[in-house]
Image (cartoon, grey):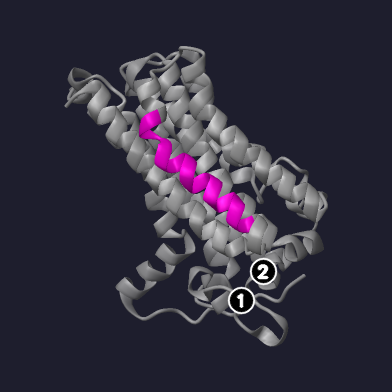
Amino acid sequence: MATTPQASPAPGVIGRFGVYARLVKFQFVIDFFLALAIVWTAMEPATRVNGAVLLTIAIFAVGKVGVLSAVMTLDDVTGIKDGSDSANYLGEGGTELRPLKRKPLLTGDLTVDQAQRFGHLSLVWGAVWWLVATVQAPHTPTWAVVVTVLLLSLSVQYSWGLKLSYIGLGELLLLFSASAFVLAPYGITTGHLPALVLVEALLFGFGQLMIAGYSNTKDIDGDAAVGRRTVAVLTSERGNRLFLGGLTALNVLVIVGPALAGWITWWFVVALLPLIVLRLRQYAGFLSNGHALLARSRGVVAFRVTVGCVLLFNVVHFGV
């Protein structure tokens, strides 16, 4: 068990806000909010300006801040308690392996109790606002309600609560959770699920999973030491490379497969060609140099390009 540093409070309200913003990884929270842009642009123009639809999206967004804050915070709480964050962010002698600013529990800017309390309150905040969003939503198909409930209850269980990443289910949870951030709000605002939106949700999910997969590759030693059973930990180096290659192939198949089946237009494949190129470059580069963090950073770029291509396609396809 790692020793937890004592907090050294940041001065003033602005400083304290900045510490909590770093705790919740605000850059990644912003990335996850791009899911709502996909949801909105995937609607028909008349639906986009419907008052009830806009209100539902706004309330869902308010709750989403809480859910994402809880996910990031409680992950860090577990990481500081079991020592995995120390192992993955600090080398021998305490040398910095990755930017420590994103880990205020490691730097001592917050205590575990402060972070844990914030994480629990954030989850309650998210649950309350998502309940309000669902109750007043224009549509409440059973599948969308189920997805919303599962997203709320499971997204925080990656390394806290059930600790699903410790029993080999982390990658599956990441894919589901990121995809559900598109599926849930789309379902309760429109009441249906076209093949195109399902594809776009899965691409959003793969975007996050392909970042985490390379992160987990870098974190093998630290994760293994605390019993976190990621694919990278459970397999050999060759097995992990094959796994990442399989994810890359599936990511491309999610784009091309539905077009081949006639479920979506071929124009979608053309629009997503930049992603296909970036995803192949990410994997080929990793095979060539084995640099997991470089591949991870390329994954972040690929994810944002994915969102950009999807938004451009939706605007052209559905009109403005």
Mark 1 Cα shell of 10 Å, populated few (<14), some (14-19), many (≥20): few
Q: Is residue 218 above or below residue 213?
A: below
x, y percentage for residue 38? 34, 33
- Residue 16, x across and y down, in percent: 38, 71
- The label shown at residue 155 is none
> Circle 2 sits in a helix, a strand or a loop, which is it?
helix
Q: Name the residue under label 1.
A: 97
Q: Which residue is drawn at 79% across and 60% down?
A: 224
Label 1 secondary element? loop
Q: Position of residue 190 (x, y in %)?
A: 33, 17
Quarter of the picture containing the C terminus is: top left
Report the front residue among 164 and 220. Answer: 220
Give the mark nearest the N terminus, 2 or 1. 2
Residue 49: in sight, yes or no? yes
Instruction: Give the residue displayed 74% in from the left and 52% down from the top.
Output: 232
The amino acid at mark 2 is Asn
Residue 65 counted in the magenta span: no
* Badge 2 vs badge 1, beta-carbon distance below 8 Å: yes
Quarter of the image for the N terminus: give it: bottom right
Amino acid tagged 1: Leu
Query: How many tags in the picture?
Result: 2
264 vs 96, nearest the viewer:
264
- Residue 88 numbered mark, or none: 2
The answer to whether residue 161 is left or right of residue 277 is right
Q: Would you identify the image quadrant in which residue 267 lies?
A: top left
Q: Nearer the viewer, residue 79 or 200?
A: 200
Residue at point 31%, 25% (across, down): 42
Q: Can residue 65 be seen in this view?
A: no
Q: Is residue 282 magenta?
A: yes
Q: Which segment did they paint magenta?
A: 270-286
Q: State whether residue 271 is above or below residue 261.
A: below
Q: Residue at x 40, y 58 (%)?
A: 27
